[in-house]
Every structure is written in C-alpha cells, then in structure tokens.
Image: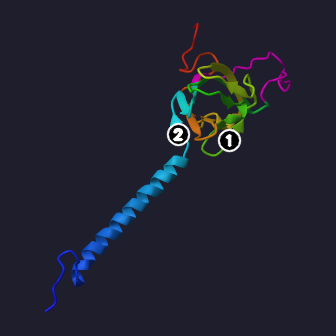
Amino acid sequence: MRAISPTRPTGAARWPWLVTAVAILAGTSGLVVAIATAAGQPKVVGTVGRSGDLSVALGRSQWVAHDSGEAPGMPMAGMPPEGFRRLHLEVELRNEGARGRSFGPDQFELVSSTKRWSLRSSSFVTGALAPGQAMGGDLYFDVPMKATGAPLRLAWQPPGRDVLFRLDGGLSDGSGGHDGERRGK
C-alpha cells in the first residue's frame, strides 16, 4: 500500500484548490487593471488641484459681458466672434516644492464631454516658479453659445497627471464672482 501525503491533494480533492487559485488570480488581475486605468484618468477637483509640487487654485469664473454700444454686425476689436461667449477664469499657480517648476498657458484648456477649446488669451507667459512662489493670472476662452449650457471643466495639463476643475453652477453672468451672486446691486 502506498502512503498518501497529507499536504498534496489527489484526484477530486485537487479541483477546489485549482478553482480557488484561478479565482484569486482573476480577482487580483482585475484589481491591477482597475488601478492602472484609474491612474491614467484625469483627477476631477473643485477649486484646488495638485500635480506634483505645483498647485492651481481656481478663483473667480464668469462670462464676460460685452456691451460695446456698437451697431449690430459691427463687433468691437477683441470681442468674441458672433455666436460665442467669452469665459474669464482667475487662477493662481503655486510651487509647493523645493525646486523650481516650469509652467505655461498652453497647459490649460476648456473641455466639455465632447469638445475642447484652447485659450483665447492669458496673462500668463511660459516661465518657472521658484520654490514657495505663487503667481495669479487670467485665462480667457471663447465658447460657442450652444455649448455654454453644457457642463464645462477647466483642464490643467502639467507634466504628470491631468486635473479637471468643475465649473458647474459656478459661472456668473459677468456681473458677479465665482459663486454667481450679483455684486453691488
């Protein structure tokens, strides 16, 4: 008679172990894929976002009121094209690290679920922030009127992970601040 090892299952006793091992392997693989997928997705934030040592704080956001007093069909220089509205966003960049960090206005875009808009103009120029330094500036985007009711996000795309700032419900009509309340009225 042959001795049976108590640590090595035989015959039908092997199947539960095999099924358990395959289930653990599949679950672990799924978790790894989910983590890798999430790591590539932009982080969605409210008013402050970070990427490495750089942070961006979103300040006032409003639609710019353009009342030029000009005759219809005669747009004033610098106004958005007909059928567009201009969005003004105030942002502050801050270097919270121990080394200088570069940045540029080309790191910002306005996005909806289906479209992207590049900056129309900005008070930022490409440069660097020294450790502990902060800089405030303005971003302007021309957005088609038909898209101004859609949920919009400010996309900040520094080296590393992209950050999306929620603008939903925070856009005023040009007479107020980020919260949309009318000032001085």
Mark 2 → mark 1, Cα distance in angstroms: 17 Å
Foreground: 102 or 116?
102
The image position of residue 28, as x and y in percent, is 39, 60
User: Label 2 is placed on what type of residue?
Assistant: Lys
- Above or below residue 53? Residue 185 is above
Foreground: 45 or 102?
102
Q: Which residue position holds label 1?
A: 116
Q: Which residue position holds label 2?
A: 43
- Above or below residue 176? Residue 139 is below
Q: Quick check: 122 left or right of 184?
A: right
| Extent of the magenta region | 58-80
Residue found at the very far top of the displayed protein: 184
Q: Residue at x 75, y 33 (%)?
A: 83
Foreground: 35 or 165?
35
Q: Quadrant of the image for the N terminus? A: bottom left
Q: Residue at x 53, y 27 (%)?
A: 47
**Residue 85 position by quadrant:** top right
Disc marking residue 65: none
Total marks drawn? 2
Could you tell me if residue 168 is visible in this image? no
The image position of residue 163, as x and y in percent, is 57, 37
